Amino acid sequence: MDRNKILIVDDLESNRIILAEIFRKDYQILQAESTVTTQRMLEKYARETAVVLLDWHLSGEDGSKILELMKKRGWMNDIPVLIVTAEHSAEVEKKCIQMGASDLIRKPFYPDVVKNRVNNNVSLYQHKNQMEEKVQEQNQILRKQYTVMKRQAEKLKKANQKMIDIVCNILEHHYPEFSENTQITREISRIIGKNVQKNYPEYKLTDQDVEAIAELSSLRDIGKLLISDHVLYKPAKLTKEEAEYMKSHTAKGCEIMRMMKDLQTPDYHKKSMEICRYHHERYDGRGYPEGLKGDEIPISAQIVSVVDAYHALISERIYKRAYSREEAYYMILGGDCGIFSPKIMECFRMSRKEMEGINTDAEESA
């Protein structure tokens, strides 16, 4: 609706007539002589009113009551108020502006000056209102887009989880050790990850990061699907050539994860690649495949690497017995499985009781 009306508030009819003459060609004129009539006019015509010209000295009151009324009713958000006054004190001007008036017109005034000031303020308000409407429209569009994206993210998250479960089922079928591995390594990774998040904020791990690392930890050895069973299940010590071939499961795991890229969110894909490739790296640079040192190793892989080593120790293999949880704990701390980050080791210590509880539950239910 067009704002084509101007409301002139003054208790003297002669003043209202003078101002009305100035704006008669540009606006439909509304007049009020008191707070009561002003309220009545605005209740009826607020959406059509472009500007209010308010005389500061009304009979028995000043213009502050009308400013308070307009502010309370929200009318001042859309309608500029210009104070018409003979006062020249800075105190009155300050009070008017603090109460929300857009401008002051001093008496005596020149018609052209009054007209320009009114038009300038109306233009500013119209621009402001148009911008606010555009912002509201954009916000509505963004909210709709966010809702769609959120739904898509939820679908992709479910697809991530489904993909992980399917791959784990394949691993368990092909590689029996995984039948006892998946849930335990997820839980241990989650516990250590939470301690890293809590105690080392420099890694900037979010709840979503911790959960993703936990879920993806079960895919760290997916590359073993492409390793020959002769080497994979060999009961004796591997030859040097066989050991190097076995190490290639880190690169082969990345090959498989690349084929699944479209089934993962970008963050899940990034972490799955990090975990597959780097979970055998060690903090002192003596790991493989690239010999990364320190925090060159992604934090996701650092967490999963200690989980992988710990779980390998407490699990029975065709080439070794299962160590007790206490033995495995001290073997990890003693460096029997290589050197891990001091920060990860501190979180590993903090996690001991919870880790042992998970293993106990898993063994009892097996």
Image: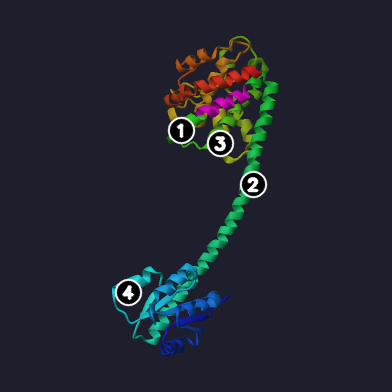
* Earlier sequence position, callout 4 versus callout 3: 4
Q: Do labels 2 and 1 touch, CB within 8 Å? A: no
Q: Do labels 4 and 3 touch, CB within 8 Å? A: no
* Earlier sequence position, callout 3 versus callout 2: 2
Question: Which percent across, then down, holds residue 358?
Answer: 58, 22
Q: Which residue is mark 2?
A: 151
**Residue 117 found in image quarter:** bottom left
The part of the chain drawn in magenta is 181-192
SS for tag 3?
helix
Q: Which residue is mark 1?
A: 198
Three-letter code for the amino acid on which mark 3 is drawn: Lys
294 or 240: nearer the viewer: 294
164 or 355: nearer the viewer: 355
* Earlier sequence position, callout 3 versus callout 1: 1
Tell me: residue 215, above or below residue 15.
Answer: above
Three-letter code for the amino acid on which mark 1 is drawn: Lys
Question: Which percent across, then down, holds residue 349?
Answer: 46, 22
**Distance between mark 2 and mark 4 Cα atoms:** 56 Å
Three-letter code for the amino acid on which mark 4 is drawn: Val
**How many C-alpha atoms fall within 10 Å of the one at disc 1: few (<14), some, or many (≥20)?**
some
Q: Is residue 188 magenta?
A: yes
Q: Is residue 191 magenta?
A: yes
| Colouring used for the render | rainbow
**Distance between mark 2 and mark 1 Cα atoms:** 30 Å
**Distance between mark 4 and mark 3 Cα atoms:** 64 Å
* Earlier sequence position, callout 2 versus callout 1: 2
Which mark is nearer the camera, 2 or 4? 4
Tell me: residue 225, above or below residue 268.
Answer: above
* Earlier sequence position, callout 2 versus callout 4: 4
